[in-house]
Amino acid sequence: MGTYYMVEMHYPLDDDRTKFNEFYHKHISMLLTIDGFLEAQRYECTHEARAPFMAAYRLREPGVMTSENYTSRAGPTSVDPAFKAKMTNWDRNLVTGDIETMEVAEDGWMVLIDRLSEDCPPLPDCFTPLKIIGLDATIVERGVMIGTDGDSAAPAAQDGWIVRSFRPIHPPRYPG
């Protein structure tokens, strides 16, 4: 079972994109010094979306997010105000599922399906279900599918689903 802290947001693609990426690189470096943060990778949607940027952090266990080591150094207050002012559609979900890693290779892809309510159609069998266990809990269930090359195999959206395809912004990062 894997536990992941998944942060998604919108950020305008204007002339400070390089500075934003530099800030986020430093932010991930700081998070990876917190005991229990095991891996991090950022992704960008390949199409227009409400929240086209996502970071996924693999955690040792859910309690990392309530540890003194995390709460004293991280969270929404650790984001530089110059960038935070431009971030919108910010959602944080803590998830768990039968997935060891969400690493996506440079030429790979990730497809997420978010089920918005219990009444929505179930996830397709080819998706690994992720149970929402904390933080904003903005969805009922998330499904993930990761591919190694070519185009993503995103299914057609169903009523009550949000389907997004992502490409990695950078390779996976680890503590140390």
Image (cartoon, rainbow, N blue to C red):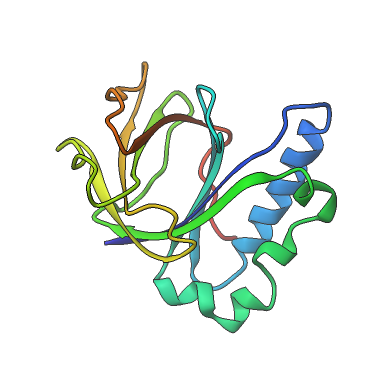
Q: Quadrant of residue 79?
A: bottom right
What residue is drawn where x is 69% and y is 47%? Answer: 25
Q: List the single residue furthest toward the bottom.
A: 68
Q: What is the total number of numbered labels drawn onto the structure image?
A: 0
Q: List the single residue furthest toward the left.
A: 125
Q: Is residue 74 left or right of residue 110?
A: right
Q: Is residue 53 left or right of residue 117?
A: right
Q: Is residue 139 left or right of residue 43?
A: left
Q: Where is 64 relative to 175, above or below? A: below
Q: Where is 39 relative to 158, above or below? A: below
Q: Quadrant of residue 175?
A: bottom right
Q: Where is 82 relative to 121, above or below? A: below
Q: Is residue 14 left or right of residue 1?
A: right
What residue is drawn where x is 20% and y is 39%? Answer: 121
Q: List the single residue furthest toward the top.
A: 150
What residue is drawn where x is 63% and y is 76%? Answer: 71
**Closest to the observer, 94 or 73:** 94
Q: Position of residue 96 (x, y in %)?
A: 32, 60
**Closest to the observer, 12 or 170:** 12
The quadrant of the picture occupied by the C terminus is bottom right
Q: Position of residue 151 (x, y in %)?
A: 37, 17
What residue is drawn where x is 24% and y is 45%? Answer: 128
Q: Position of residue 67 (x, y in %)?
A: 54, 80
The quadrant of the picture occupied by the N terminus is bottom left
Q: Position of residue 109 (x, y in %)?
A: 40, 28
